[in-house]
Image (cartoon, rainbow, N blue to C red):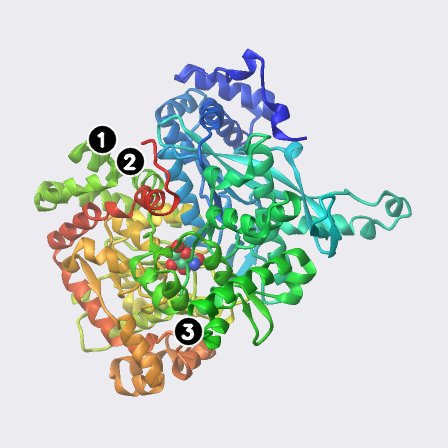
């Protein structure tokens, strides 16, 4: 069934139903209706989950009119749509954001009170949809929030994983992964649309045939297929009545099961095909260190982009739309290489299904795609072995080969037959296995290619894709990342938001540069005092949360030093750990009076990829050191480490506003941007950081005096690498470093058990791929500066306020404006 057949003609069909009245009474009525008629329970017998679901559905009612109106308005106007193609959306809790966007916070609070319920308790029932791994997925969620707030037509396309990012628990300090069953208790935010399912094909072979017009053609004869069922989630703009759509795809077997086999009693075999097909969207990024895992991941990627393109052409465009004009109606943004298979898919649709000439199809395809690269790590640039791609998507492989042939012919022509260059630039890598370089394919096809921070974009041009930037200098641009201030300031930090509004008035939440107006308040002692009171309140809120959530009792009155992010060697949690060990040693030594040191609590939050050995060893080591310090009376009240398990968006919202110090200590040239760094600065934490990713821009904006810079620059790192980096030499030449490592290796920091530290210490001393040792001394010195500044409470608060005032640039609204201007050529309505 195709979309246009659904087009309503009757007058009644054109007007959305009237939503519930926007007052406490209207809210209560709707809530009770939801509870009684949808949940099927009276209030008196309802569980907290019933109440949460009814509350969420009530709020959803208020958004529906906006959603229907927005859709109609956009269809009538024939707006160009931004099709954000992302394998991840790390959404965070939906209820808080929906209440804020709809301006219903007070009404909902009152209404729940009238029902004898506590809205905060109900809000805390929500299990966040963790459909992303970290920065990239959270960025996608921020971007769709901004586009709705700016009233830009956007459909976020992605995957409805049945299990999101795993839930992290610790057993004896070691990470243990538990499935994240976020759907188990019901999911009130999504609308399943099984009647809009589309078929996605896989496998088989291709064959040539002669068309009716006598032209030679190719067709794909697939071997199996699966249904892609869309689930719509609402993306409300901030108080503007706009509601955009997130369309997440779920895999459903075309044939539920084999009834014959079932009747013969072979139950396992009867559902084998179904299980196989539905595994596609079972879990976020399955382990990809096994061949099976990799294949599933490629299936996921093709599954969601093929469904999205098909759905857009069939259901969003008018039935008679001329696909030659496709670029007028869609700009597909490729969020990293994960959706890049969309390029040959569109070519296939145009050439094989719509009879386009090859060149004509290529011309249209190129105009429809832009590509954002989010990494600098070579291993994160995906390549797909041709045997796998050929087996799963034979026609797509042929298309890529032909695109590559045409492209290399151009390279040879433009660069005087330079064969070495052609091989470097080829979409096909020959060694160690023949494979398709998805970043090359994306770069060749895309109209624009962007990095995600100034430094990253420069390194992308100069080091990752230099041949391409030489060939097409204008193709490359930068858009520095941003974060949504609605979630990460207003929801996360209500105290500070109120203070800011009192100082500079309303309006800053959608025009974040206005935070600049706070600058003069940095010199106002009374304001500083109130700012400190807000921070103290946020710390107390965190203490309560960690106490109840993790059984962790944070000491009071400490400098709160926070490092939260995925665990990866390049991010250098091990450098932070060495610093902690060094602080511990200092407190145990006779050299300093413990009372003269700054009391400090270091908070870690990090998940490691399940198959990443060294990351998991680092987690275990941090936990072992934390336990040792915790048990050591001698340092009580001066140093503590907390490592709450399962760091996620919800925890971030309480943790970040409480922080004094933000740790952004990756090796220069490795972190593409970082977005946690922006969230901390916006919430008044000072950064200690390297010249990496968006740290560079944060420092430029907040000023050197309000940022603790340390470590090698990227060119220095490159130089050292070229010269040959020997970590053992650094160890031998730095007494403080040697002492910290020896202490760790001896087991003194791990409850007397040296084996706990062995893997990490061995790795640091033998390879130290990310040069933690080389930056150690500079890091410790910068931390000494931190302590000296923190001792001057007024100076510290002043810097904290200036961090807030000067970080307005890092709103994702600004990022979106940059995409609109520099990449999509679309203008926002607001
Ligand atoms: O651009 C968003 C983020 O993406 C990553 O998380 C990624 O997955 N590639 C990068 O590591 C971050 O630097 C970046 O901020």
778 and 514: which one is in front? 514
Secondary structure under the numbered disc 2 in the rendered image: helix
Question: Label 3, on which residue?
Answer: 751
Q: Is residue 483 placed above or below 376 in the rendered structure?
A: above
Quarter of the image with the C terminus is top left
Q: Earlier in the sequence, mark 3 or mark 1?
A: 1
Tell me the mark number nearer the camera, choosing from 3 and 1.
1
Ligand 1: quadrant of the figure: bottom left
Q: Is residue 654 placed above or below 376 in the rendered structure?
A: above
Secondary structure under the numbered disc 3 in the rendered image: loop
Secondary structure under the numbered disc 1 in the rendered image: loop
For the residues labelled 2 and 1, the Cα–Cα distance comes to 9 Å
445 and 654: which one is in front? 445
**Residue 47 picture location, percent across and down:** 55, 31
Numbered label attached to residue 506: 1
For the residues labelled 2 and 3, the Cα–Cα distance comes to 51 Å
The residue that appears at 41% across and 73% down in the rendered structure is 750
In screen coordinates, is 707 left or right of 119?
left
**Mark 1 crowdedness (10 Å alpha carbons): few <14, some 14-19, many ≥20:** some
Q: Is residue 790 placed above or below 31 in the rendered structure?
A: below
Q: Earlier in the sequence, mark 2 or mark 3?
A: 2
The residue that appears at 57% across and 44% down in the rendered structure is 160
The residue that appears at 51% across and 56% down in the rendered structure is 168
């Amino acid at each position: 069934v195709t979309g246009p057949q659904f087009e309503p003609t009757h007058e009644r069909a054109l007007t959305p139903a009237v939503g519930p009245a926007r007052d406490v009474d209207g809210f209560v009525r709707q809530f009770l209706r939801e509870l009684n008629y949808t949940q099927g329970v009276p209030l008196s017998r309802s569980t907290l989950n019933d109440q949460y679901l009814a509350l969420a559905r009530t709020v959803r009612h208020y958004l529906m009119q906006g959603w229907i109106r927005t859709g109609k308005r956009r269809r009538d106007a024939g707006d160009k749509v931004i099709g954000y193609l992302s394998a991840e959306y790390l959404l965070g809790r939906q209820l808080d954001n929906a209440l804020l966007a709809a301006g219903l916070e007070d009404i909902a609070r009152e209404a729940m009170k009238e029902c004898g319920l506590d809205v905060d308790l109900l809000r805390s029932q929500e299990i966040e949809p963790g459909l992303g791994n970290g920065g990239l997925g959270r960025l996608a969620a921020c971007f769709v929030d901004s586009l709705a707030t700016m009233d830009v037509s956007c459909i976020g396309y992605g995957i409805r994983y049945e299990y999101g990012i795993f839930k992290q628990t610790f057993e004896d300090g070691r990470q243990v992964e538990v499935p994240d069953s976020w759907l188990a208790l019901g999911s009130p935010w999504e609308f399943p649309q099984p009647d809009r399912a589309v078929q996605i094909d896989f496998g088989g072979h291709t064959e040539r045939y002669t068309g009716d017009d006598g032209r030679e053609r190719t067709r794909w004869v697939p071997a199996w297929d699966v249904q892609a069922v869309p689930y719509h989630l609402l993306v409300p703009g901030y108080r503007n009545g706009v509601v955009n759509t997130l369309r997440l795809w779920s895999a459903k077997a075309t044939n539920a099961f084999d009834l014959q086999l079932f009747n013969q009693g072979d139950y396992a075999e009867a559902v084998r095909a179904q299980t196989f097909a539905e595994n596609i969207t079972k879990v976020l990024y399955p382990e990809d260190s096994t061949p099976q895992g990799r294949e599933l991941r490629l299936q996921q990627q093709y599954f969601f982009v093929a469904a999205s393109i098909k759905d857009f052409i069939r259901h969003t465009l008018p039935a008679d739309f001329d696909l030659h004009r496709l670029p007028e109606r869609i700009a597909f943004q490729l969020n990293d290489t994960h959706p890049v298979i969309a390029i040959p898919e569109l070519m296939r649709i145009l050439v094989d299904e719509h009879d386009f000439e090859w060149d004509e199809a290529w011309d249209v395809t190129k105009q429809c795609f832009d590509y954002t690269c989010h990494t600098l790590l070579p291993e994160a640039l995906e390549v797909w072995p041709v045997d796998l791609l050929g087996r799963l998507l034979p026609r797509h492989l042929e298309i890529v080969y032909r695109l590559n042939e045409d492209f290399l012919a151009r390279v040879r022509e433009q660069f005087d037959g330079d064969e070495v260059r052609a091989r470097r630039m080829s979409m096909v890598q020959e060694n160690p296995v023949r494979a398709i370089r998805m970043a090359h394919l994306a770069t060749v096809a895309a109209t624009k290619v962007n990095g995600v921070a100034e430094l990253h974009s420069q390194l992308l041009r100069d080091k990752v894709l230099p041949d391409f930037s030489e060939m097409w200098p204008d193709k490359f641009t930068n858009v520095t990342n941003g974060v949504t201030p609605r979630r990460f300031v207003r929801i996360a930090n209500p105290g500070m938001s109120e203070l800011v509004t009192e100082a500079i008035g309303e309006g800053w939440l959608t025009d974040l540069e206005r935070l600049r107006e706070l600058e003069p308040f940095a010199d106002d002692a009374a304001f500083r005092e109130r700012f400190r009171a807000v921070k103290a309140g946020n710390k107390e809120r965190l203490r309560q949360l960690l106490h109840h959530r993790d059984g962790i009792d944070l000491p009071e009155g400490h400098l709160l030093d926070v490092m939260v992010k995925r665990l990866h060697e390049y991010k250098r949690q091990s450098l932070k750990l060495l610093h902690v060990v060094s602080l511990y040693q200092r407190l145990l030594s006779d050299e300093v009076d413990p009372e003269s040191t700054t009391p400090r609590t270091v908070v870690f939050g990090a998940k490691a990829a399940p198959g990443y050995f060294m990351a998991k060893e680092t987690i275990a080591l941090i936990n072992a050191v934390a336990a040792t310090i915790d048990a050591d009376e001698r340092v009580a009240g001066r140093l503590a480490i907390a490592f709450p398990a399962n760091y996620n968006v919800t925890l971030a919202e309480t943790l970040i506003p409480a922080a004094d110090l933000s740790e952004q200590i990756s090796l220069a040239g490795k972190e593409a941007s970082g977005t946690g760094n922006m969230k901390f600065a916006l919430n008044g934490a000072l950064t200690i950081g390297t010249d990496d990713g968006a740290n560079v821009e944060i420092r430029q904006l907040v000023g050197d005096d309000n940022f603790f810079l340390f470590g090698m620059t990227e060119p220095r790192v490159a130089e050292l690498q070229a010269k040959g980096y020997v970590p053992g030499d650094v160890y031998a030449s730095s007494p403080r470093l040697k002492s910290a490592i020896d202490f760790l290796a001896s087991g003194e920091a791990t409850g007397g058990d040296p084996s706990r530290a062995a893997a990490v210490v061995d790795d640091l001393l033998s390879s130290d791929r990310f040069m933690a040792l080389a930056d150690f001394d500079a890091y410790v010195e910068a931390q000494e500066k931190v302590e000296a500044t923190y001792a001057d409470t007024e100076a510290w608060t002043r810097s904290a306020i200036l961090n807030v005032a000067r970080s307005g640039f890092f709103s994702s609204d600004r990022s979106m404006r940059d995409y609109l201007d520099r990449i999509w050529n679309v203008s926002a309505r607001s």
